[in-house]
Image: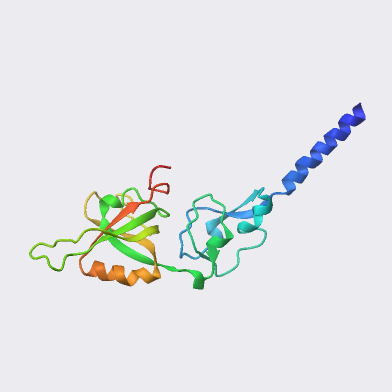
């Protein structure tokens, strides 16, 4: 009976060791990863997890991070980094765009938040005080890459406008700059479910 117990114990130990050996070293995001930004080792933390057949879907930490890597899509803090979220500079389809927006729409945002950008163009037919044609969705679900920092905190005081950097599709930047230069107002609306978006 004692021999059977010993053999059973050895078998169980082998299963535990085998299970532990199945863990794969992959990279997780140390903080929010924003599309368009260079990816460095400081942005990542190694974790050993059991992924089975899905291990190939994530960025392996078995070797060092290849040089010249860029973030192609959002990855939240602590999330495993999908291989498809990382690529070369040539694969990046976004550029940083700084928008001046009302302080009220900035207060709840964080770097890594996803926002919809609404542009309210001026009405060229209007006379006297500036009038607007109505807000239009210009960018959907873009990442916040930078926020203002002042002594009063990220959003500064309660009033006025604040500069916010978003990563916008390269094909849309020229049009948005043209509208802003013509006097359009810009409003950011946080996308639910992400940082600063509520409903988490």
Residue drawn at x 22%, y 64% is: 121
Residue 98 sits in quarter? bottom left
**Which residue is at the front of the view, 160 or 119?**
119
The x, y position of residue 194, in whole percent, is 42, 49
Looking at the image, is 1 positioned above or below residue 103?
Answer: above
**Which residue is at the front of the view, 49 or 84?**
84
Left of 83 or right of it: where is 76?
Answer: left
In this rendering, does residue 156 appear at all? no
Which residue reaches farthest left? Answer: 128
- Looking at the rendered image, the quarter that the C terminus falls into is top left
Residue drawn at x 26%, y 71% is: 178
The x, y position of residue 2, in whole percent, is 91, 27
Which residue reaches farthest top? Answer: 1
Residue drawn at x 38%, y 66% is: 96
Left of 68 or right of it: where is 153?
Answer: left
The x, y position of residue 108, in whole percent, is 34, 48
The x, y position of residue 64, in whole percent, is 63, 63
Left of 133 or right of it: where is 195?
Answer: right
């Amino acid at each position: 009976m004692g021999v059977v117990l010993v053999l059973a114990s050895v078998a169980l130990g082998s299963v535990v060791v085998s299970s532990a050996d199945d863990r794969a070293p992959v990279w997780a995001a140390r903080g929010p990863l924003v599309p368009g930004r260079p990816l460095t080792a400081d942005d990542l933390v190694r974790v050993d997890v059991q992924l089975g057949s899905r291990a190939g879907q994530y960025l392996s930490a078995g070797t060092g991070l290849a040089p010249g890597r860029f973030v192609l899509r959002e990855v939240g803090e602590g999330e495993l980094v999908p291989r498809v979220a990382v690529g070369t500079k040539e694969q990046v389809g976004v550029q940083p765009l700084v928008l001046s927006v009302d302080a009220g729409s900035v207060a709840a945002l964080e770097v890594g938040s996803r926002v919809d950008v609404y542009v309210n163009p001026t009405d060229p037919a209007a006379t006297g005080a500036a009038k607007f044609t109505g807000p239009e969705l210009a960018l959907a679900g873009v990442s916040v890459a930078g926020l203002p920092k002042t002594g009063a905190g990220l959003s500064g005081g309660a009033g006025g406008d604040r500069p916010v950097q978003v990563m916008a599709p390269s094909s849309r930047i020229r049009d948005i700059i043209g509208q802003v230069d013509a006097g359009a107002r810009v409003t950011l609306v946080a996308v639910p479910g992400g940082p600063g978006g509520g409903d988490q």
